[in-house]
Each structure stands twice: as C-alpha cells, then as structure tokens.
Image (spheres, rainbow, N blue to C red):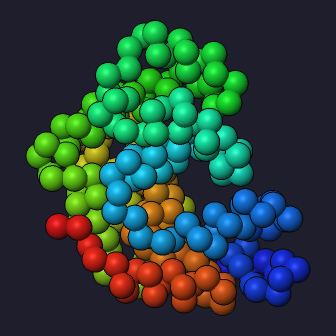
Amino acid sequence: MKPLYLPPDGRPRCAWCAAAPGDAEYLRYHDEEWGRPVADDFRLFEKLCLEGFQSGLSWRTILNKREAFRAAFAGFDYRRVAQFDATDVARLLADPGIVRHRGKIEAAIHNAGRCVDLVATEGSLAAYLWRFEPPKNSVAHNLSQSAPSEALSKDLKKRGWKFVGPTTMHALMQAMGLINDHQPGCHHWALAQKARDAFERPG
C-alpha cells in the first residue's frame, strides 16, 4: 500500500492525489465524487465513457476536459449520443477540448446504442451495474482489476460494448462507488462508506 498523501489542510488522502499537488479540482473530485454511490444513468454513462477515454492517459487530463466532453457528447444522454453519425464523429475529431481519438469516440457512440438496448431489457443502466456490486470488503485495495470487474467486462462485451476491459471496469467500479477503494486511513474512506451504507440500491 502506498503512503497516504498529506496536503496542507492536514487531512490524509489516497496516494493518487499526490499526482496533482495543489490542484483543488483534483482534490474535490477525490473528496466529493470518487467512491460515492451513483444511480443516475447519464452520470453512469459519462463515467463509463470517460474511463474508456482515460485509457493510456492520466485521470487529471480527463478531469480537466470533462466539461468539454459533456458539451461535446450532449451531456452524456446516451439516447442522443446513440443518434450521432459521421458528421458528429468529424465534429468530435475537430474538438480540441476533448481527447481526439477516433477509436474511443466511435466506441462511445457505439456504446450509447448498446446502452439503449440494455436499458430496454434491464430497466436502467444503474440497476444493471449495481448487480455487480461485490460483497462488502471482499475486494482488496490497490488492485487494477478484480473478479467483479472481470465479470462486468465479460458481460458487457457479450452485449457488444467496446473499450470495457476489466481494468477500465474496475476503475468505473471505484469511481461510481460500487466499491469503496479509498485507502484505509484516508480521511474520506469513512465518508464514502457512510454514503454507501445510506444508498438505496436501484432494483
């Protein structure tokens, strides 16, 4: 386990926060979003897409571009993104505010269509994803992937989704609060756990 990061406010945080010392937005994301449970389908589709875009890059890069991504991808309304065509792909490839990677852009649009299908059969993206929540404290900290993320990845691939490998899906599980992966000793572990305990799982 990496040593905790101790910023000037004296509250220890997960070691990955040290990648952007002094970056208030990066710390805010760690403190208020990462590991907190999410049930909104648009936010979940956003997280799923952005984790795919992050592959090979730093999360700080993606976070700094998040508002531009939201504008470019219709607020990650998967129903609207599923209607994007070649003109939209060209528009996105010309947008300097986002990551201009054709494969990832086309995968996000493709996955939006798969999300429409999934919601039609499963009720919601949230209900589907939360079915992969592992038993409490069953996933060790500091992993890049896990058995639950492998199962989620396998099932999504079977449904035709792209850029949903087990490492990417483990990052999604961390970000959406499907697991509480704040390091033991991180000031926000208990806060994230309290939010998870109070969260009503979508059914």
User: Is residue 144 visible in this depiction of the protein?
Assistant: yes
Residue 18's place in the image compared with 183, above or below, is above
**At 48% across and 72% down in the image, what residue appears?**
36
Residue 77 placement, left or right of 160: right
Residue 8 placement, left or right of 200: right
**At 82% across and 87% down in the image, what residue appears?**
10
Instruction: State the residue in front, 134 or 197.
Output: 197
**At 49% across and 16% down in the image, what residue appears?**
89
Residue 49 placement, left or right of 186: left
In the rendered image, which quarter is residue 179 located in? bottom left
User: Is residue 104 visible in this depiction of the protein?
Assistant: no
In the rendered image, which quarter is residue 131 located in? bottom left
In the rendered image, which quarter is residue 98 located in? top right
Q: How many marks?
A: 0
**At 34% across and 78% down in the image, what residue appears?**
199
Of the 4 image quadrants, the one containing the C terminus is bottom left
Across and down, in percent, residue 171 comes to 51, 58
Residue 137's place in the image compared with 120, above or below, is below
Residue furthest to the left in view is 121
Across and down, in percent, residue 147 comes to 36, 65
Instruction: State the residue in front, 151 or 17.
Output: 17
Across and down, in percent, residue 190 comes to 54, 89
Across and down, in percent, residue 153 comes to 34, 50
Of the 4 image quadrants, the one containing the N terminus is bottom right
Residue 138 placement, left or right of 51: left
